[in-house]
Image: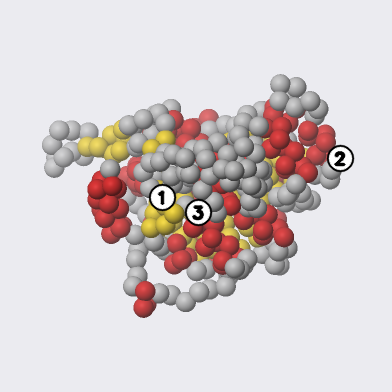
């Protein structure tokens, strides 16, 4: 197993844009950080979009540096989104299923909460439901990711991101999950509630809670809007009002869902939407000095491979997207970076280092 992992990394390293230590670029001051997570997005998922785009330039080609992240959790070589989300949000390895805390139950503040303490604005945008593992890792502290009532309590009564939007309305309103209407409670506590993307795009009064579907927001193949890009850019536009800077986490959640379903067509639609998001955020970084963009995945899903459609690869013109599992895999995932001090992410690293490097650049030691 160790030999296989070594061979894998050796094969992948040439794809990363490296540099020698004596020629490392200088640090650039970082004011804004946009962390973009493609849930379940391994290298093959990104490559599938490049191939589907007939190798024309994609947003991934714009990345200035590429590294790899090792995603294992504290108790498993194959992580789930809770443990990996916590690793990136809080800088700790924890057990699968746990959010915002160490295996012994000790609560650990997230990079978003630390940014908030420093006076920076914070925002979270997802296409899944807002209480799902990845977004919740940035504001909740619970031993089990399914403790939705407790996650809501942490959100309303604890650290409040300035913006939290996605799906999941039923978890705030149904008696199957909560004893009272938690949307009403949030509004009483000073939150601005919006129930559609259109309402959100007309709103700037924070903190904003946006719940745009009962469960997850519809997948890209089911709609004709670029919701992820549009919601992310409106969020960034609001956060940009803070002259001290901001931290934003944006998740393309449905990449993972397409791979769990082993559905190559859905994966293509999700990667196309993700590409539009990346290009828009890169454009923002180009015109806003001090903006760092980091793109990665919490884990790889589906064991995605890209195989020749025929027996003789020399004559094959087609590519088949194949899946090795309906679950997660232990394959390291790519880390793309762009903008201020992007070179800091151009190596093979532990997933907890994504937290520590962002913290060092945005907040300090």
Task: Give coordinates of residue 304: x percent, y percent.
Answer: 34, 37
The kind of secondary structure element at disc 1 is strand
Q: In this view, does 55 lie to the left or right of 125?
A: left
Residue 143 in percent (x, y) is at 62, 37
Residue 352, labelled with which disc?
3
Q: Which of marks 2 and 1 is nearer the N terminus?
A: 1
Location of residue 363 in the rendering, given as x and y in whole percent from the top left corner: 63, 66
Q: Mark 1 points at which residue?
A: 70
Residue at x 24% of width, y 48% of height: 3
Q: For numbered disc 3, what is the local secondary structure?
A: helix
| Residue underneath mark 2 | 188
Q: Taking 42 as reference, is 340 above or below it?
A: below
Q: Which of marks 2 and 3 is nearer the N terminus?
A: 2
Between 28 and 75, the one nearer to me in the picture: 75
Residue at 32%, 35% in the rendered image: 321
Q: Residue at x 34, y 32 (%)?
A: 323
């Amino acid at each position: 197993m160790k030999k296989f992992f070594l061979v894998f990394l050796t094969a992948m390293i040439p794809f990363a844009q490296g540099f020698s230590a004596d020629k490392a670029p200088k640090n650039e001051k970082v004011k804004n950080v946009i962390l973009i997570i493609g849930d379940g997005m391994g290298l093959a998922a990104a490559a599938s979009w490049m191939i589907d785009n007939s190798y024309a330039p994609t947003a991934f080609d714009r990345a200035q540096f590429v590294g790899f992240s090792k995603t294992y959790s504290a108790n498993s070589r194959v992580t789930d989104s809770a443990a990996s989300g916590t690793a990136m949000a809080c800088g700790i390895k924890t057990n699968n299923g746990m959010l915002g805390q160490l295996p012994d139950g000790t609560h650990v503040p997230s990079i978003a909460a630390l940014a908030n303490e420093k006076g920076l604005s914070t925002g979270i945008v997802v296409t899944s439901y807002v209480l799902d593992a990845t977004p919740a890792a940035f504001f909740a502290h619970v031993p089990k990711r399914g403790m939705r009532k407790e996650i809501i309590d942490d959100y309303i009564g604890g650290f409040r991101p300035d913006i939290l939007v996605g799906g999941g309305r039923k978890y705030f309103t149904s008696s199957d999950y909560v004893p009272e209407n938690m949307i009403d409670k949030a509004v009483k506590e000073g939150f601005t509630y919006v129930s559609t993307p259109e309402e959100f795009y007309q709103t700037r009064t924070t903190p904003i809670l946006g719940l745009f579907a009962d469960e997850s927001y519809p997948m890209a193949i089911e709609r004709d809007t670029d919701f992820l890009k549009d919601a992310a850019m409106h969020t960034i536009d609001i956060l940009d009002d803070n002259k001290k800077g901001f931290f934003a986490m944006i998740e393309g959640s449905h990449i993972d869902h397409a791979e769990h379903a082993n559905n190559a067509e859905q994966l293509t639609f999700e990667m196309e939407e993700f590409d539009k998001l990346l290009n828009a955020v890169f454009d923002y970084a180009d015109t806003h000095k001090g903006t760092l963009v980091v793109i990665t995945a919490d884990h790889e899903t589906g064991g995605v491979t890209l195989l020749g459609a025929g027996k003789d690869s020399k004559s094959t013109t087609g590519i088949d997207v194949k899946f090795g599992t309906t679950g997660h895999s232990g394959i390291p995932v790519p880390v793309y970076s762009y903008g201020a001090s992007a070179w800091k992410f151009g190596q093979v690293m532990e997933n907890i280092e994504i937290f520590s490097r962002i913290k060092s650049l945005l907040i300090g030691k």
